[in-house]
Image (cartoon, grey):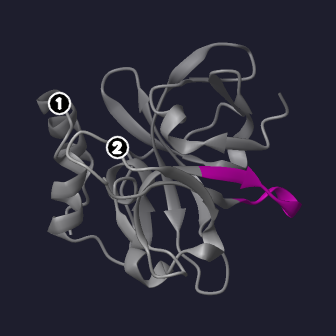
Amino acid sequence: MSGSKAFVARLHGVPVFDPAGDKAGKVRDVVLVNRSSDSPRIVGMVVDLSGKRRAFLSIGRVLSIGGGQVITTGRFSPKGFKQRGGEQLVMAEVLGRQVTLADGTSATIEDLSIERGRGGEWRIDEVFLRRPRTGPFSKGKTLLADWEDLRTDELADTDSEHILATFEDMPAADVASALLDLPTQ
């Protein structure tokens, strides 16, 4: 696999290897920056290194994504990961969000497809969505939409309602882990 397209939710926990084949850590989250005129740009990944330390891996240092692994140049930020203004963590802040589609209907973001574009830049390509339930025992229908089909002004800030909705169906251990990933702002 060339590694030019991947779904973010499937990257959680995937091992990260350096070019020599040594395991450097595992993917914890993906970091994006919203843009007003285009789909969000992926700037990097948060990687759990051995010893419970988290580091930032610039997306420019990723050689390949695919086959259940991420291959890097082997260079990580020497400082621990610290979220900057304007950055969002996909798994902690974006997945599980309620959004409105261009046609006025609502859906929940379940996954994001990221794709390497021209010049090696990674961006969000498609969004895997789930419509609201139609009955008490049913799951909503799913659909794959382009980023441009969403009203993206709703993704600008994280609020407690979206966070609680994300945690609603998660096991307690996953909630605790996700709470640790939330920004301190």
Q: Which residue is mark 1?
A: 171
Q: Amino acid at mark 2?
A: Lys
Q: Secondary structure at mark 1?
A: loop
Q: Quadrant of residue 76?
A: top right
Towards the viewer: 127 or 63: 127
Residue at 26% over, 60% down = 183
Q: Position of residue 82 (x, y in %)?
A: 36, 56
Specify start and end residues of the magenta stretch as a single range.
113-122
Please say if 176 is above or below 144: above
Image-based side of 93 in relation to 102, left or right: left
Q: Secondary structure at mark 2?
A: loop
Label 2 neighbour load within 10 Å: few <14, some 14-19, many 20+: few
Q: Which residue is mark 2?
A: 139
Please say if 162 is above or below 55: below
Image-based side of 180 in relation to 17, left or right: left
User: Circles 2 and 1: CB distance less than 8 Å?
Assistant: no
- The image's mark for residue 10 is none
Residue at 31% over, 54% down = 134
Task: Please identify, in this view, whether the residue under mark 2 or under mark 1 is nearer the observer.
Answer: 2
Residue at 39% over, 53% down = 95
Residue 39 appears in the picture as rendered: no
First in sequence, mark 2 or 1: give its number. 2
* Distance between mark 2 and mark 1 Cα atoms: 19 Å
Label 1 neighbour load within 10 Å: few <14, some 14-19, many 20+: few
Quarter in which the C terminus is drawn: bottom left
Magenta stretch containing residue 76, yes or no? no
Image-based side of 135 in relation to 90, left or right: left
Q: Position of residue 158 (x, y in %)?
A: 28, 70
Towards the viewer: 29 or 133: 133
Q: Quadrant of residue 119?
A: bottom right
Q: Position of residue 181 (x, y in %)?
A: 27, 47
